[in-house]
Image (cartoon, helix red, strand yellow):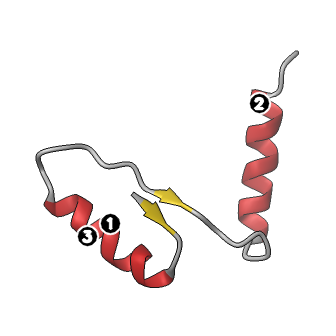
Amino acid sequence: MRVSSRSEFVQLPQTALRDKKQMHVLNVVLDQADRSPAMVRLAKRLAKRLSPGK
């Protein structure tokens, strides 16, 4: 399920939780300017961990 708006962000997780027949993956698409400092730190740590040669 692709989530690209606030209303979808509210609605789709609830829809997914109600559907017990299958697993759902939410693909949350954020505007590049909409990043918190914590999200930037997390992304840097993940990139460092996943980089080749580590």
Q: Quadrant of residue 47?
A: top right
Callout 2–callout 1 Cβ contact below 8 Å: no
| Location of mark 1 (residue) | 13
Q: Earlier in the sequence, mark 2 or mark 1?
A: 1
Left or right, residue 14 beside residue 25: left
| Circle on res. 14 | 3
Tally of numbered discs: 3
Please tell me whether mark 2 sits on a helix, a strand or a loop.
helix
Mark number, residue 49: 2
What's the CA distance linking mark 1 and mark 3?
A: 4 Å
Q: Residue at x 72, y 76 (%)?
A: 34
| Image quarter of residue 21 | top left
* Residue pictured at 42% horizontal, 55% vertical: 26
Residue at left 77%, top 69%?
32
* Marks 1 and 3 close (CB-CB < 8 Å): yes
> How far apart are labels 2 and 1 at the CA level?
29 Å
34 w.r.t. 44: above or below: below
Label 1 element class: helix
User: Residue 2 appears at what percent x and percent y?
Assistant: 46, 61
Q: Amino acid at mark 3?
A: Gln
Image x and y of residue 15, in percent? 23, 67
**In this view of the protein, which residue sits in the foreground, 19 or 36?**
19
- For marks 2 and 3, give the CA distance: 32 Å
Name the side, left or right, on which 7 lies relative to 4. Answer: left
Q: Position of residue 42 (x, y in %)?
A: 72, 52
